[in-house]
Amino acid sequence: MRDSVRTLGVAGVAVLLLTSCAPGDQGQPPEEQPTVMNGAGQTEEDAEFPESASGQVAGDILEILNSGEDTAERDWEDRLSESSAELLSAAELADVLNTQIRPAGPWTTVEHEDFDDASISTLQSPQGQELEMHLALDEDGLIETLFFAEPREPVEPAEGFEEVDERLTELPGEVHAVVVEDGETLVEVYDGEPAPLASVAKLYVALALADAVKAGEVSWDDTLEVTEDLRSLPSGTLQDQPAGYETTVFDVAQRMIQISDNTGTDMLIDLLGRDAVEQAVADSGHHNPALMDPFPTTREMFQLRWGFPELGEDWKEGDAEARSEILEEIGEEDLEITDDDVEADDVDFDIDWYATPDDLISLYEQLFEAMEEHEELEAVLASNPGLTFGEFSPEDLWWDTLAFKGGSLPGVLNGAWQAESEDGTVRTVILLTQHEDAEELAEQAEEIFSLAEDALTLESP
């Protein structure tokens, strides 16, 4: 249950640390040409970052990464913007860097593109591994965005919706894709059958939360607590917090969408009640709500797939009553598996959440209606654009609001976007892909998400 974002290297090594920018802001400020520092011909001692705001911060980060000692909370607590710190604390950031970035170092800067308050630095390990470090600062010079991703070759953009349709049709495996603008179908590549959603299903939890807030049953400021029985596996950061850690409903919801936090998702399901999420599925216009009755938590999904696979086999054959009994049985068991037990090639489409592209279009309609009453919901849904739109400056993009949720499991790679302009134009892009060969699907990730970008940015026909 992981987010799949083209710019975060879904097919390879990628670590999302902090992304609190608005769509189009990640590393590409408008109307500025980058200052490029190429490491070719330079020694490690000779390479220098420019005297810009982001250049100095990038240099500081590299120094911390290459330090002989692990980085600590104190190194970051005065460097993060308020919105970034709410997403990932200084202590959490230090832990991610210590476990996922520093071990491959020391890192050398090969190239640096600088935009004054944002930059992209290409780092190289002694083994030759390269990572792009994307950095953006707020107006106070604090870190607003920081993520690392494998460098990737650009994909040739599609010239029109017909080409998007053709290239999606040519993808290996199964593709369920729809692009709709104001009720007009621009792309349609699917047979009407439901597809596995992976983390895209978290949008249904978001709708249930919006319904509960509207009914006065829940407040965005209410406090939630991490407990052992709600702890899930990554993606996310809340699984690493100790039992008793408290934060707000708004923060948990933002983590659920922005970094696809699994433990946060389960905390919200526990708060709302499983019945409320199942009701949201039905109310959203899902063509067959029984497909997600009962609606499993992410922890339960991990247990069904990898913790107790024998119960997973029973789940596949069971009706709603039998499946509810299975979840009760699983609920009494400790989560003994770890992230290492989730094998990347262990494909099983029969244990997942399911919907069609049309179901998700209807779901987004409900969510965008709810956004009109709850600015917090808009902040949650728009917290991660899913793509960087690197060749565009923000004023080139036609929308004012862009919601995104991605999802991946072995053999499943999905993305769901809805954009709305100031004049009320709405375009929805749903890409649900699956393949029995998880590795081959991963190799198509760049093409899939490039086509999503094209589908969002092409001019209306």
Image (cartoon, rainbow, N blue to C red):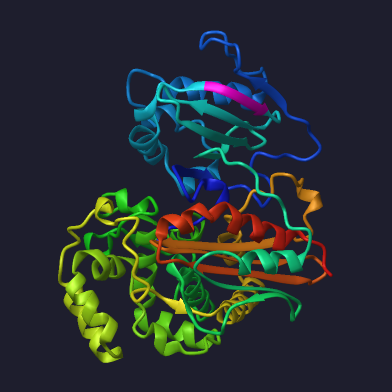
Q: 70 or 79: nearer the eye?
A: 70
**Quadrant where the image shows the C terminus:** bottom right
Figure quadrant of residue 30: top right
Q: Is residue 443 above or below residue 411?
A: above
Main secondary structure found in the magenta portion: strand
Figure quadrant of residue 182: bottom right
Tell me the magenta residue range.
109-113
Q: 238 or 173: nearer the eye?
A: 173
Q: Is residue 397 left or right of residue 36?
A: right
Residue 145, position in %: x, y? 57, 40
Residue 36, position in %: x, y? 69, 24
Residue 331, position in %: x, y? 20, 73
Residue found at x 78% / y 71%: 425
Residue found at x 61% / y 78%: 361
Residue 112 in sight here:
yes
Residue 255 in sight here:
no
Residue 238, position in %: x, y? 35, 53
Q: Is residue 277 magenta?
A: no
Q: Is residue 69 left or right of residue 413?
A: left
